[in-house]
Image: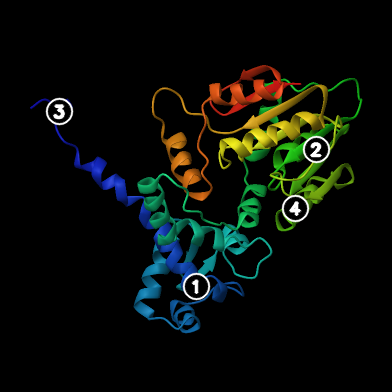
Amino acid sequence: MSPSTMPDSDKIYDLYGGGFLGQFTRLALLLDVFTPLSSGPASAESVALACNASLEGVRALLNYLCSVQVLEYQLDSQRYALTPSAAAFLVRGAKTFAGDWILANTDPVLWEKMLQTVRSGTAAGYSLPWAQDAWLESYSPSRVAYSLELWHTVGLALNDGQPLRMLDLACGCGIKTLAFAQAHENVWVTCVDSDSVLDVARDLAARFGVEARVTFMPGDILSDDFGEGQYDAALLGLITYILTPEQNAAVFQRAYRALRPGGMLVIDAIMPTAQPAEWASRATLLMNTWNGGAAYPFHVYQGWLDQVGFRKTVQHNEQWLSAIK
C-alpha cells in the first residue's frame, strides 16, 4: 500500500481534539473560576473554595487554562492569575464580559439544533448574545488593518475634503466604519443596531476619538427605513449570510434607496467557491441553523443586487463585494 493510500489516524484525532479547549473553557465559566482571581492572584485552594468545587478538579482545570495562556501560573507562590484578556472578557460583571458568548457557542443545545436543521431542512433557531461578540471584535488587534484594507480594496473615494457619509447596517462594534472615520476626518458614520450592541459601538467611537462624527440609530435592519438618498456608502458586514434570501432582498432594496446616486454598497461576507472550503461550509451550517441563512456565492448576490437596481457589482475577493447605485 502506497503512502498516499494509507489511512491517517492523525486526521481522525484532529476531528475532535480541537473541541477540548472550548469545552474546558465552558467548564471554567460554569464554575466561574475567573471571578475569584479578579481581586488578585490566588491559590487553587482558594479558587476551589470560592467555586464550591473539588480541589483536584479545579487545580487540573486551572493548569490547563495556564497551558493555553488563558491564565498565568506564578511558580514561586504557586498561585494563579488572570491574563489581561481573561480579566477583560471572562470575569462575570466586567463591562466587556464575553463568557455568555462562549457558553452559547459551546452549548450542546446548539449542536442538537444543528442536527435537527440538517435533518429537516428547516432552521431550528438559536439566539446568541451579540453584544458580547461585539465587545470581542472591538478589541481585536487585527480588525483596524482589516477594515482599512476593505475600504482601500473596494475603492471608496474621498473627494477633496467633502463630507463622506456612511451607513453601517447591523454595525456590531462598528469597527469597519469607525476605523475609516478615525483615518479620515471628513467621514461621518451612522451606526444601526440594537441598543445593547450600540453601547459597544459608542465605547469604540470614544476610544477612537470620533464620537462627534457618529450617529447611533437603534433599530432593526429587517424592518426599519434608512431614509432616501442620504449616504455615499453603506456597509453590510458579516450579516447577509445570517439572513434568508427574502430578508436580504428586502434589506438591499432599502439600502439602495438610502444611497445617493453613485453611492456604493459594500458587503463583507464569506462567499463559497466551486471547491468546498472550511469557512464557507461552517458558515452555512451555523447560519442555516440560526435563521435559515447560508454562505451565498457571488452570482447569487449579483442577481439580488441587479434586481434591486444596482450596477457595476464587483467581487474583490472571497469575502468582499461592492455595487454602485
Q: Where is residue 102 shown, x and y percent of the image?
A: 51, 58
Which label number is shown at residue 25?
A: none
Please name the amino acid that badge 3 sits on.
Thr
Task: Look at the numbered disc 2 and give the secondary structure of its residue.
Answer: helix
Q: Is 16 displayed left or right of 308 in the figure?
A: left
Which label number is shown at residue 5?
A: 3
Q: Which residue is mark 4?
A: 198
Q: Which residue is mark 1?
A: 33
Number of residues whose C-alpha sits closer than 10 Å to that of mark 3, classed few (under 14), some (14–19) or many (20 or more):
few
Question: What whole-number distance in Å separates the C-alpha atoms at marks 1 and 3?
Answer: 47 Å
Q: Quadrant of residue 4?
A: top left
In the image, residue 136 above or below residue 159 = below
Please name the amino acid that badge 2 sits on.
Gln
Please name the amino acid that badge 4 sits on.
Leu
Label 4 vs label 3, nearer the camera: 4
Question: What whole-number distance in Å separates the C-alpha atoms at marks 4 and 2?
Answer: 18 Å
